[in-house]
Amino acid sequence: QLHLQESGPGLVKPSETLSLTCTVSGGSISSSIYYWGWMRQAPGKGLEWIGSIRYTGTTYYSPSFESRVTISVDPSRTRFSLSLTSVTAADTAYYYCLRHGSGALHFDSWGHGTLVAVSS
Amino acid sequence: DIQMTQSPSSVSASVGDRVTITCRASQAISRWLAWYQQTPGKAPKVLIYTASTSESGVPSRFSGSGSGTDFTLTISNLQPEDFGTYFCQQTSSFPLTFGGGTKVEIK
C-alpha cells in the first residue's frame, strides 16, 4: 500500500526558504502514469495546489507560486522535495505531499500533512 | 485558470438527511471533476472522480453528477461520519484548482 510521509522544519523565518521532503514507500516514483505533488492548506482555509512533478523531471507549477517554487525528485527515486523561497507569514499552512494520475488529475494518495509556521 | 465556485459554503443537516452540494466551473470541463471529503485533523480523501465515478471503498450514499460547467455531489442518508468539509476540484487541466469548500455541520 502506498504511503507518503512529509518531513522538514516546522518553523521557518520570514524571507527564508521553506524546504520539505516527501518519502514514498509501497510504490514507485518512477511509474510513468503518476505525478507527485504538493498542496497546502492554511489553518481553517481551502486547498491550494502548489505544483507537481513526473519522475522524468517534468514539472507543472501553480502561477501563484511559480516565481519562487521548485519541486524535484531525488536521484534515489524514493523521495521528492518542495522548495519555496522568500516566505512570509502568509505561507503558514499545512503542507501535504500527494500523488495524482497523468491522465486523471485527481489526488488519490495523500501524506498526513505537516504544519509549517513562518515566524521570526 | 479555471475558477471553481462551490455552494453553499456551509449546510446544517441531521443524520438521515439528503445533502446536495454544487460546484460550478468558470469554463466547460467536460466531466473532469473530483470531489473530496475532509474531516477535522485529517488529509482530504477523494470520493468521486470524473464527475460520477466512485473511488473504491466509498459508500454508495455518495454520488456525483454533472458535466460541462455544473456539477453536484449528493449525500443520501447522511451519517455521523459524513460531517466535515467537502471540496470540488477540476481535473481538466493545469493549474489544478479547487472550490472553496462546503462545511457540513450537525443540526
Image (cartoon, rainbow, N blue to C red):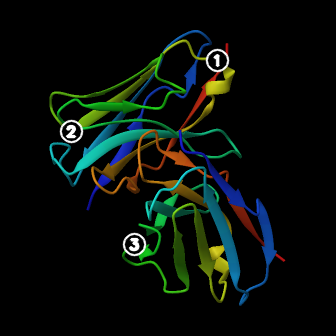
Q: Circle 2 sits in a helix, a strand or a loop, which is it?
A: loop
**Left or right: residue A71 compared with residue A90:** left
Chain identity of mark 2: A
Question: Residue B86, how many percent across, how many down?
Answer: 62, 63
Q: In front: mark 1 or mark 3?
A: 3
Q: Circle 3 sits in a helix, a strand or a loop, which is it?
A: loop
Could you give the CA–CA distance between mark 1 and mark 3, rounded to whole angstroms?
A: 37 Å
Is residue A14 visible in this depiction of the protein?
A: yes
| Vertical relation: A9 (above or below) A108 | above
User: Farthest residue in the right direction?
Assistant: B107
Which residue: 40% across, 78% down? B57
| Vertical relation: A91 (above or below) B92 | above
Q: In front: mark 3 or mark 2?
A: 3
Q: Which residue is the site of mark 2? A: A78
Residues flagged by tags 3 and 2 on a common chain = no
Question: Residue A51, how many percent across, how many down?
Answer: 41, 34
Q: In front: mark 1 or mark 2?
A: 1
Is residue B43 visible in this depiction of the protein?
A: no
Characterize the local packing of mark 1: few (<14), some (14-19) or many (20 or more) Cα atoms within 10 angstroms. some
Q: Amino acid at mark 3?
A: Glu
Q: Which residue is the site of mark 3? A: B55
Question: Residue B95, how many percent across, how many down?
Answer: 46, 39
Q: Which mark is residue A88?
A: 1
Q: Circle 1 sits in a helix, a strand or a loop, which is it?
A: loop
Q: Are the two marked residues, 3 and 2, in contact with CB atoms closer than 8 angstroms?
A: no
Which residue: 63% across, 75% down? B82
Characterize the local packing of mark 3: few (<14), some (14-19) or many (20 or more) Cα atoms within 10 angstroms. some
Q: Which mark is residue B7?
A: none
| Vertical relation: B95 (above or below) A2 | above
Q: Earlier in the sequence, mark 1 or mark 2?
A: 2
Characterize the local packing of mark 2: few (<14), some (14-19) or many (20 or more) Cα atoms within 10 angstroms. some
Q: Amino acid at mark 1?
A: Thr
